[in-house]
């Protein structure tokens, strides 16, 4: 399918993303959507939750691997190429950046800047333009009426990494949800995509 | 056509294409997504001519399956962990009666302590219940094994358990090929029961059998499983023929032909280990991995042949026979009896502990160096053990056996400071 | 239950009679009856369960026009009817386990439904141990789901197959191998046990009935009635056990009759959870007459005897009589508040 | 099904190979016991057998009647006048009330008359001739039985009509004469020759002259006893027997209003009740003992009381004068014998009727050698034969209760003996069959059914006419009554044994009424069949060890 959003780079051989959030924020769905999007791109993809009996509010992790060849590896992602943080309040409780690669992407659901969040040390040269905050919750609320940030964050991710295209993200959203739910989330993803692509915020 | 699917959804849809007539189940993590999906398909009519029975326990789930299968219905259920144990009595009964029930076991640890994560303690505890036990290395194989399971079960009139790792496979999204209905129909054909409850031809099923015939009954079920040893590879080959995919068989091998060190595994850990083994091969190491698919029946002869060239065999298993060590390893050892090939047991991934490349690499290095103890516990938190052993043994003596185990894991009993 | 016939010699109480029309005769008077459980079984002499099972199953077979499948719990009935290499059953029959007969029956029913076989009816059966104890969860599940199964419990008030141990259906003061007549309160304790029929009613299933082998026409009529309903149905049949009760082999029917005539075992039927009729006591007798015929109560009469315990049992019987309206006082409209019964019950109606 | 699993799956019904009969230590067997009704019937009727037939109703009634008349040719009569000891013996009396056997018998008798059913055809003539002296129930019964056996019978009676006491002793309100005549006619229709108004005075002469091979004497007891009552001449005194006889012959004796009957037997009651109907407004029965000791039958007593008859117990008549009698109060001594107290009372009396007993006129027998007479009656052996070979006797003239039933029994027993005597093969004694007692009955199986009450004539007509007091049963109540029979001691095909056997070891023949059988290959000998047999027709016997 057509690559969207003007891909800058091709995906690396294996791309591993780790999603942090709380039970009820659609963390597992985020990983699932990302794998669906990658699959739509013709990639091999594997998504899985940090298995457990998560309850509402509890810290949750989900993983997604993509690759150009079949994925056999089944261990949790210890050295992510990207971390997606759906809930900034986790920053001080969970080692969300654990094992993040030198060039690893960081995407945080927040209206505040990285500096404001006191994460300046993340801003290394190797990660230039790869550490971003997005008010995904607000964008989501604006579109869906609920502050579930997962779809929006995926839009932002595609804007940053081009591992998967915005079209694939939206295709995945439409594959996973139906009707208004799908449309509004896709719209939120699109908003986040534009938000990141908008130089002002870069 | 491949789809990006959760393993459980793939299983449910594949089972549906096997056209079960009765599905009875009791929910237990991590089996739930499978039976939820099946009940949905029955209600929606996507799965026709099928009764979904919400039972009040796993014991009844298997009992309903027994009644249904004896009435000539293709019957399916799924469970895990405690649920499998709660079924135990009925499991023996189903196999004793020779009822071709197919069951998914979403492998999970057994409490206490209660633990919902993956290992093989549940299925291993039922290894003698007379069911065929097949283990899937990935979700695609899990799907494909279910189709083969129905064929095997009905061909031999014996129940079959398809074991797939809980969460690791059941909850993982990956690309899956759902077999086409026509292909499945052609592969399975209609269920022709060996015996059926029917007023037109009444029989008495489940007689009381005394010493004069019990041994023969048992021997005959043993023969069935021996027949399965021949049938399983045939079915796998036929499946490859029709579906163009490798799935099942007694076991599959990677780089074992010329390997000095052969690692034997069951289930989904094969993938991770395969990656490690490939890396080691590139670095010139002589190592291979064997993925055991059929644990019951156990392919003693075939394994013996496959392992004959090895210098050592390491069995990595996700269950512990407390007081003994490995379970699969014991069977492997009997397969190698008479040879001089040393065997090692690695207990790993109990209660959901991840098995990672990070610790596998050094493990295999140690093994290839011939420095692996007979029984090794992977990633054991030795500091905890040391503390606990000390606490527990205050004032008392742990004894030479316990201490030798501790030495094996590198713990020398600390003196009080 | 049983309508009066214009035959004053046998009334409604004997099995048949040359002056009765075929409709008026019991299935068991038919020379061509099914004998679903046939000769050569290994039940004890005078076994009430063998008798009750043949009545129930033959009646069901007739009602279903021969299209019946039976699922049997472990127990005496299963053991004496199917020791390899001989089976006494002539209907399709399966034995699986002790505690799962209701679930196996459910499975049979589910398979038949899946196959669109509406002609075949399913019977589950077991003793009191398999039914009210180890199989109770499965039974309740079968009730609650509305499975199309008639379950018949042959209640001989204990684990006779294993050597007469106490079950939840064992009556107070009765001697069993695990409730020996020693100590201050000899025999089984008072205030224990459960009433499976009342609990079945609480599930509000279409049909619940009790019966005894003391009134075989009544038993037959109830099975026949039960077969007119679909969904879960439950019949609880009292079947004296000469071995376990220490009664004479020729008094099996007599003892069952006394259980009903004393009020110790109320005979009634309930539709949709409400009792619709009770079998009135014809000739009321004191419980002592019932107890004396059974060695399991011998300790109540040896030496000084235990009139206090006999009185308690009589009181229990009297409560049943009052609660279920067992005396023929012309008051035909039976209206029993199940909750009240359960609330005031020392042991339910048995 | 192919290749069924070994051992766990079995063929249905294969347990037939397991013969459980060898568990048995006792075996059941069907028995036939003597029903108490049959046992109690002096006429020797097989009551249970004819009730069994009657239970079917419809065509069963004729079958029942035919069974009945094998022993008694006079069911309609017996159904009216018999004091039914069968009902006294009936086991059902211990359950609710005795079966109304007598009323069913009457119903059958009346049905026979109504439908003109005929007695059986006599057997082929034997050429033997038998003389019967006395056309009472005993003689008629004997004649009937002999005729059936092919013998030629001549009955001689001094009275104008046949019937003996049935006609000249029993008042019409108890036995309608047309009924009597109908049943007698049926007997004579068999070829029995009746010669009335022909007293026999010289028996040897009569036999020689008539070339009779044997004789049965049953002249009854028609001679009323007398007691001397001082002053008896003054008032009108007569005896009951001749009074009743006279009434039968159309006499209207002038008894007056106040009639005192002296005696306590049935005859006294007959006399008093007849007097009532002849205009005596308040008959009084005077008896020396208490009511309890009165020989008369309770039923008759009650009917008499209903009709306004009064009683003076413990009283005797010491004298009678003009229009009155003197009564003396009696009291019972320790032996229960009445003793005079000297306490006197005078009551009004236009007539005194003596009913203090009857005797037979034995003149006929006195000259016969070998005949033994004691207590005014002729002694006979088991075969009803007197001491004189070939001379048999029965009825009221031999020692026995003086009832129609007894007489009929004598008649048929004598007939059997005479037949045997004529053939030279002595009749076999009745086989000794065990009595069926109430203890062998399992009453549970019989539903509650109190007996039917027979309708009775209204009081006014009872006071003024000789119309029949007790009426017969209609079809439905006769059927009801017949079906109340418990069939004591004999199988009535209720299928209970077939139904209650836990081992299916009772075999039932296809058709009703055919006997059941035990399958001893499988019977374990539990005994339930015997215990649950409603009528006690099964007994358990030890296995031969």
Image (cartoon, coloured by chain):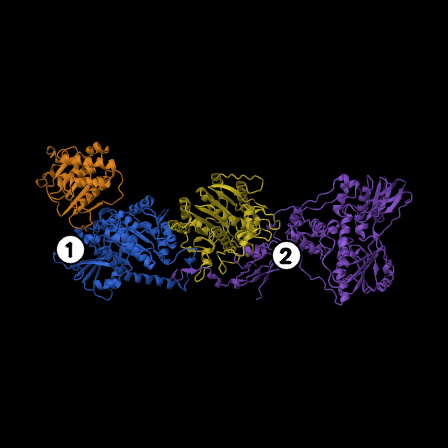
Chain colours: A orange, B blue, C yellow, D purple
Residue D313 seen in this snapshot = no
Total numbered labels placed on residues in the image: 2
From the viewer's perspective, is residue A117 above or below residue C98?
above
Disc 1: which residue: B278
Residue D87: mark: none
Give the percent coordinates (x, y) of residue C245.
52, 53
Using the image as rendered, state which of residue C342 and residue B227 is in the foreground.
B227
The image quadrant of residue B199 is bottom left
Q: Residue at x 91, y 43 (%)?
A: D234
In this view, the residue in front, B361 or A176, is A176
Q: Which chain is home to disc 2?
A: D
The location of residue D374, given as percent across then percent down, is 83, 58
Identify which residue, B342 or D23, lies in the foreground.
D23
Q: Which mark is residue D490?
A: 2
Q: Label 2, label 1: how many angstroms apart (C-alpha)?
A: 96 Å
| x, y percent for residue A154 | 18, 39
Q: For the residue carrying disc 1, how many other residues have a C-alpha within 10 Å: few (<14), some (14-19), or many (20+)?
A: some
Name the quadrant containing residue A36.
Answer: top left
Q: Please, is residue C55 above or below residue D210 in the view? A: above
Q: Quadrant of the C terminus of chain D?
A: bottom right
User: Is label 2 in a helix, a strand or a loop?
Assistant: loop
Judge left or right: residue B319 versus residue D515: left
**Numbered disc 1: secondary structure:** helix
Query: In this rendering, would C342 be left or right of A125?
Result: right
């Amino acid at each position: 399918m057509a690559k969207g959003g003007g891909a800058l780079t091709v995906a690396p051989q294996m791309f591993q993303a780790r999603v942090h959030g709380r039970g009820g924020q659609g963390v597992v769905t985020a990983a699932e959507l990302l794998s669906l999007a990658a699959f739509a791109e013709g990639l091999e993809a594997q998504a899985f939750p940090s298995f457990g009996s998560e309850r509402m509010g509890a810290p949750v992790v989900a993983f997604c691997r993509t690759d150009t060849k079949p994925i056999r590896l089944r261990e949790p992602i210890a050295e992510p190429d990207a971390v997606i943080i759906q809930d900034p309040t986790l920053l001080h409780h969970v080692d969300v950046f654990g094992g993040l690669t030198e060039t690893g992407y960081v995407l945080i659901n927040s209206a505040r800047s990285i500096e404001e969040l006191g994460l300046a040390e993340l801003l290394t040269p190797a990660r230039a333009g790869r550490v971003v905050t997005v008010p995904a919750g607000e964008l989501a609320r604006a579109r869906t009426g609920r502050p579930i940030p997962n779809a929006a964050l995926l839009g932002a991710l595609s804007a940053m990494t081009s591992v998967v295209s915005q079209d694939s993200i939206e295709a995945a959203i439409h594959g996973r949800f139906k009707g208004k739910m799908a449309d509004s989330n896709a719209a939120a993803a699109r908003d986040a995509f534009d938000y990141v692509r908008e130089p002002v915020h870069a | 056509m491949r789809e990006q699917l959760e393993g459980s959804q793939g299983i449910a849809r594949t089972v549906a294409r096997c056209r079960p007539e009765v599905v009875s189940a009791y929910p237990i993590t991590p089996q739930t997504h499978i039976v939820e999906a099946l009940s949905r398909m029955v209600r929606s009519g996507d799965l026709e001519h099928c009764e979904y029975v919400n039972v009040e326990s796993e014991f009844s789930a298997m009992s309903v399956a027994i009644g249904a299968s004896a009435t000539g219905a293709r019957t399916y259920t799924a469970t895990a962990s405690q649920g499998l144990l709660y079924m135990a009595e009925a499991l023996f009964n189903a196999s004793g009666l020779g009822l071709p029930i197919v069951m998914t076991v979403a492998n999970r640890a057994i409490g206490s302590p209660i633990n919902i994560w993956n290992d093989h303690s549940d299925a291993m505890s039922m290894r003698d219940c007379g069911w065929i036990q097949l283990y899937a290395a990935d979700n695609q194989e899990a799907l494909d094994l279910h189709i083969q399971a129905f064929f095997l079960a009905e061909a031999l009139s014996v129940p079959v358990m398809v074991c797939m790792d809980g969460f690791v496979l059941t909850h993982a999204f990956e690309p899956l090929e759902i077999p086409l209905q026509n292909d499945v129909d052609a592969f399975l054909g209609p269920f022709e029961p060996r015996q059926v409850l029917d007023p037109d031809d009444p029989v008495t099923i489940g007689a009381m059998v005394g010493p004069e015939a019990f041994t023969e009954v048992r021997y005959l079920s043993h023969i069935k499983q021996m027949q399965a040893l021949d049938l399983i590879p045939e079915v796998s080959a036929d499946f490859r023929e029709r579906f163009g995919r490798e799935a099942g068989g007694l076991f599959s091998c990677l780089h074992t032909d010329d390997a000095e060190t052969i690692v034997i595994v069951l289930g989904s850990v094969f993938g991770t280990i395969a990656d490690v083994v490939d890396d080691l091969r590139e670095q010139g190491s002589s190592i291979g991995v064997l993925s055991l698919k059929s644990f019951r029946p156990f392919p003693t002869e075939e394994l013996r042949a496959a392992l004959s060239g090895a210098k050592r065999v390491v069995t990595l298993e996700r269950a512990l026979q407390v007081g003994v060590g490995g379970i699969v390893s014991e069977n492997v050892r009997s397969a190698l009896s008479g040879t001089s090939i040393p065997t090692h047991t690695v207990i790993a991934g109990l209660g959901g502990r991840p098995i990672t490349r990070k610790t596998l690499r050094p493990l295999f290095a140690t093994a290839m160096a011939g420095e692996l103890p007979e029984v090794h516990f992977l990633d054991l938190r030795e500091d905890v053990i040391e503390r606990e052993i000390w606490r527990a043994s205050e004032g008392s003596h742990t004894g030479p056996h316990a201490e030798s185990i501790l030495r094996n894991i590198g713990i020398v009993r600390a003196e009080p400071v | 239950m049983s309508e009066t016939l214009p035959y004053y010699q046998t009334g409604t109480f004997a099995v048949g009679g040359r002056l009765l029309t075929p409709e008026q005769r019991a299935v068991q008077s038919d020379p061509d009856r099914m004998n679903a459980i046939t000769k050569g079984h290994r039940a004890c002499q005078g076994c009430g369960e063998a008798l009750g099972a043949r009545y129930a199953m033959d009646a069901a077979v007739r009602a279903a026009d021969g299209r019946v499948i039976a699922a049997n719990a472990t127990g005496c009935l299963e053991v004496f009817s199917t020791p390899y290499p001989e089976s006494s059953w002539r209907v399709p029959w399966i034995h699986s386990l002790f505690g799962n007969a209701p679930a196996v029956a459910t499975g049979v029913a589910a398979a038949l439904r899946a196959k669109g076989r509406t002609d075949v009816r399913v019977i589950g059966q077991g003793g009191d141990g398999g039914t009210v104890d180890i199989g109770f969860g499965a039974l309740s599940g079968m009730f609650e789901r509305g499975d199309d199964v008639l379950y018949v419990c042959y209640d001989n008030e204990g684990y006779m197959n294993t050597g007469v141990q106490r079950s939840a259906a064992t009556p107070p003061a009765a001697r069993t191998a695990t409730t020996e007549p020693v100590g201050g309160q000899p025999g089984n304790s008072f205030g224990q046990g459960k009433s499976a029929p009342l609990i079945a009613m609480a599930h509000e299933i279409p049909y619940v009935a009790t019966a005894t082998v003391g009134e075989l026409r009544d038993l037959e009529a109830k099975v026949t009635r039960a077969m007119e309903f679909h969904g879960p149905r439950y019949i609880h049949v009292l079947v004296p056990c000469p071995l376990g009760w220490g009664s004479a082999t020729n008094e099996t029917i007599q003892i069952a009759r006394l259980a009903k005539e004393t009020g110790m075992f109320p005979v009634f039927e309930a539709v949709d959870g409400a009792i619709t009729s009770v079998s009135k006591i014809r000739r009321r007798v004191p419980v002592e007459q019932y107890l004396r015929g059974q060695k399991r109560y011998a300790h109540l009469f040896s030496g000084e005897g235990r009139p206090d315990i006999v009185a308690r049992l009589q009181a229990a019987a009297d409560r049943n009589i009052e609660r279920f309206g067992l005396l023929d006082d012309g008051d035909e409209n039976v209206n029993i508040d199940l909750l009240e019964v359960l609330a005031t019950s020392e042991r339910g109606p048995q | 099904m192919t290749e069924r699993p070994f051992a766990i799956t079995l063929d249905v019904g294969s347990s037939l190979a397991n013969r459980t009969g060898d568990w048995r230590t006792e075996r059941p067997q069907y028995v036939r016991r003597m029903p108490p009704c049959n046992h109690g019937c002096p006429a020797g009727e097989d009551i249970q057998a004819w009730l069994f037939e009657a239970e079917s109703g419809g065509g069963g009634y004729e079958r029942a009647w035919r069974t009945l008349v094998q022993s008694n040719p006079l069911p309609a009569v017996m159904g009216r006048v018999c004091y039914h000891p069968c009902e006294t013996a009936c086991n059902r009396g211990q359950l609710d009330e005795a079966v109304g056997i007598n009323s069913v018998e009457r119903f059958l008798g009346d049905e026979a008359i109504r439908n003109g059913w005929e007695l059986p055809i006599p057997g082929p003539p034997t050429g033997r001739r038998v003389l019967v002296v006395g056309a009472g129930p005993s003689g008629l019964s004997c004649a009937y039985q002999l005729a059936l056996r092919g013998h030629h019978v001549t009955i001689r009676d001094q009275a104008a009509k046949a019937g003996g006491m049935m006609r000249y002793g029993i008042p019409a309100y108890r036995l309608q004469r047309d009924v009597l005549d109908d049943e007698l006619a049926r007997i004579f229709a068999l070829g029995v020759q009746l010669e009335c108004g022909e007293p026999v005075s010289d028996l040897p002469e009569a036999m020689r002259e008539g070339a009779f091979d044997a004789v049965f004497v049953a002249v009854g007891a028609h001679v009323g006893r007398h007691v001397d009552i001082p002053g008896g001449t003054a008032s009108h005194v007569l005896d009951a027997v001749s009074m009743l006889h006279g009434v039968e012959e159309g006499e209207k004796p002038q008894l007056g209003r106040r009639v005192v009957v002296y005696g306590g037997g049935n005859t006294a009651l007959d006399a008093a009740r007849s007097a009532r109907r002849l205009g005596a407004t308040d008959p009084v029965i005077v008896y020396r003992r208490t009511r309890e000791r009165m020989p008369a039958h309770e039923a008759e007593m009650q009917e008499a009381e209903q009709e306004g008859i009064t009683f003076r117990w413990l009283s005797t008549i010491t004298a009678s004068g003009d229009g009155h009698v003197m009564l003396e109060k009696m009291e019972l001594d320790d032996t229960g014998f009445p003793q005079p107290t000297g306490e006197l009372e005078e009551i009004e009396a236009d007539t005194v009727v003596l009913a203090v007993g009857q005797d037979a006129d034995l003149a006929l027998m006195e000259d016969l050698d070998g005949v033994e007479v004691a207590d005014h009656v002729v002694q006979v052996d088991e075969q009803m034969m007197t001491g004189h070979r070939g001379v048999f006797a029965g009825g009221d003239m031999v020692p026995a209760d003086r009832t129609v039933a007894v007489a009929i029994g004598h008649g048929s027993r004598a007939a059997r003996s005479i037949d045997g005597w004529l053939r030279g093969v002595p009749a076999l004694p009745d086989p000794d069959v065990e009595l069926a007692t109430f203890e062998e009955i399992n009453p549970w199986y019989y539903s509650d059914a109190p007996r039917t009450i027979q309708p009775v004539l209204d009081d006014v007509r009872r006071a003024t006419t000789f119309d029949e007091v007790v009426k017969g049963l209609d079809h439905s109540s006769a059927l009801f009554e017949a079906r109340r029979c418990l069939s004591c001691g004999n199988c009535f095909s209720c299928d209970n044994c077939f139904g209650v056997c836990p081992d299916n070891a009772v075999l039932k023949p296809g058709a009703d009424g055919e006997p059941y059988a035990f399958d001893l290959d499988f019977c374990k000998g539990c005994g339930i069949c015997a215990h649950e047999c409603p009528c006690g027709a099964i007994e358990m016997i030890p296995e031969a060890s």
